[in-house]
Amino acid sequence: MFENSIILLDWIGIVVFTITGALVASRNQMDVIGFILLGTVTGIGGGTIRDLILDAHPVLWLDRPQYLVVCVAVSIGVFFTAHLVTSRYRLILWLDALGLALFATAGAEKAASLGEAPIVAITMGVITACFGGIIRDVLGKEDSIIFSHEIYVTAAVVSAASYISFSALGLSRELAVGLALAAGFGLRAGALAFGWSLPRYKPRAPDT
Amino acid sequence: MFENSIILLDWIGIVVFTITGALVASRNQMDVIGFILLGTVTGIGGGTIRDLILDAHPVLWLDRPQYLVVCVAVSIGVFFTAHLVTSRYRLILWLDALGLALFATAGAEKAASLGEAPIVAITMGVITACFGGIIRDVLGKEDSIIFSHEIYVTAAVVSAASYISFSALGLSRELAVGLALAAGFGLRAGALAFGWSLPRYKPRAPDT
Amino acid sequence: MFENSIILLDWIGIVVFTITGALVASRNQMDVIGFILLGTVTGIGGGTIRDLILDAHPVLWLDRPQYLVVCVAVSIGVFFTAHLVTSRYRLILWLDALGLALFATAGAEKAASLGEAPIVAITMGVITACFGGIIRDVLGKEDSIIFSHEIYVTAAVVSAASYISFSALGLSRELAVGLALAAGFGLRAGALAFGWSLPRYKPRAPDT
């Protein structure tokens, strides 16, 4: 089942993003079907958009229907265990950080393996990493995490660009993947732990 | 034009969903072009996403441009007649219930006819049934119907899973379609009439 | 690089829509990565959806990665210059008007060149023109411009329908494009300058 590292990254990323979607469902006090819907959309949404744009058919969950089984099972599991978590919001943020690095790396690797240009591969990594969470937040009426004050999209860019750079430098795929994951997750973890952020736009003229 | 039952389901589903989209436009006091936009997006949005993910090109309204003509005509008709309805919101709910069962069945049937696995076919039914309404509610700033307290997405799952199950049991396509429609619409109708709902997630620890 | 007029329209449309997305980022006081994300999504979102539905792979920015380079560069440029603008909101509206006419014409032309029916080509023009802005406004939490009281979607319909009509009448492609641009931009400009609008739906019965 785990033929290569892209698929392994996809598996872990899908599980952690599904958990974040189901936790958002718990914050909205949905029923179990709502958990499954929001968990599954978050888990496979980014990868689906990636595969559609890359014309990489069948898209991931048509190619491997077991992804859907896992999304459903994980969502149901969260429905019965979410009350055990002290702070569901913090857990969402940390799992999302892990999924972000995983999907950014996996998305860039998939696009590069299909021969896309480096800037396209980096963009596909960012899309894969960010769009599941964007859909989750729009549907769950959360303030969108991608526009949080702390570094977020930047960490996806760093993971994707690291993978592309390290591959171009001739590193083995496993090493490039490992370093890319560490760079993106480390940056986002620092942002969560220490509030790291980039300078924000400040209007200097009266804002109209 | 009505070569087979999938296409007939698509036609009726498109008409009723277009009406719900145009009625949401009326609640936002839009102009006639706004009616056409919101009606058409709601009518063909779910089927378009289904066909994109299934890689079933040309997508429905490129294959049959007459779908667009019908969406435009129905939306214009609603623009001039919506004031005749006593409660537009109740009418939206009931037409949406009918469209939900129709599109869930049609989506599952189309995916199954393309050889997809049962869980994929059921998921495609749910996507076809729910995404037109999701887009309508996001654009029209309505509270999303898919997260209403009464049973909603569950009815789409029931229609889609019924079709797949009855087909697997060897029932004729017409019978399987009829039973699937009745099961999903009946469940959603009961939810609307009697307030049926599933147990919702209740935090047992302090919610954070 | 500018092999033909469709591509030229795409280029200018992408630049002006990217600026509007980046200006919305400035109104939300994002960091530079937020500018790039919102600028790029707005600049290439409509064309990406167009190409996915038309099954015209590779989609525009996979075919021409330099589009991405331009989106990134323009977004960064806006990050450092947006404070020079007196009224960023008015600038957004006027650039959006220009992009609207450009993308409506380009979308209709591309669909027609692929042999789609006239009503499909007009619809593709409207999708190309409107969906970048729709995504921008949903992500940036702006009131969606497509439902503004002044004429908006109608101008996209006029540009797209004009191009299809003038082509059918045998005008040269350049002339048809020029007239279509002038018609759509002129209509939207009039709406912005003079508040032109279509009659809106007014409930005559008590609204429920």
Image (tube, coloured by chain):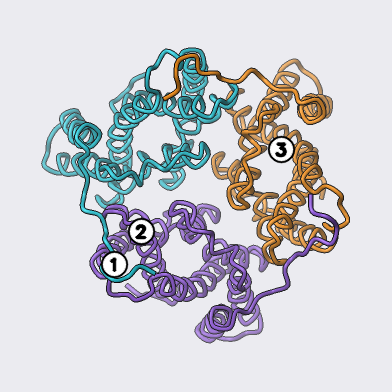
Chain colours: A cyan, B orange, C purple
Q: Secondary structure at mark 3?
A: helix
Report the amino acid beneath label 3: Phe
Quadrant in the picture for residue A132 = top left
Q: Which residue is mark 3?
A: B103
Q: CA distance from mark 1 to mark 3?
A: 44 Å
Q: Position of residue C57 (x, y in %)?
A: 45, 54
Quadrant in the picture for residue A174 = top left
Q: Position of residue B129 (x, y in %)?
A: 67, 37
| Left or right: where B89 falls relative to C134 | right
Mark 1 belongs to chain = C
Q: Position of residue C91 (x, y in %)?
A: 41, 74
Report the amino acid beneath label 2: Ala
Mark 2 belongs to chain = C
Q: CA distance from mark 2 to mark 1?
A: 10 Å
Mark 3 belongs to chain = B
Q: CA distance from mark 2 to mark 3?
A: 38 Å
Q: Which residue is mark 1?
A: C78
Q: Is there one chain holding both mark 2 and mark 3?
A: no
| Left or right: where A131 falls relative to C104 | left
CB contact under 8 Å: marks 2 and 1: yes
Q: Which residue is mark 2?
A: C25
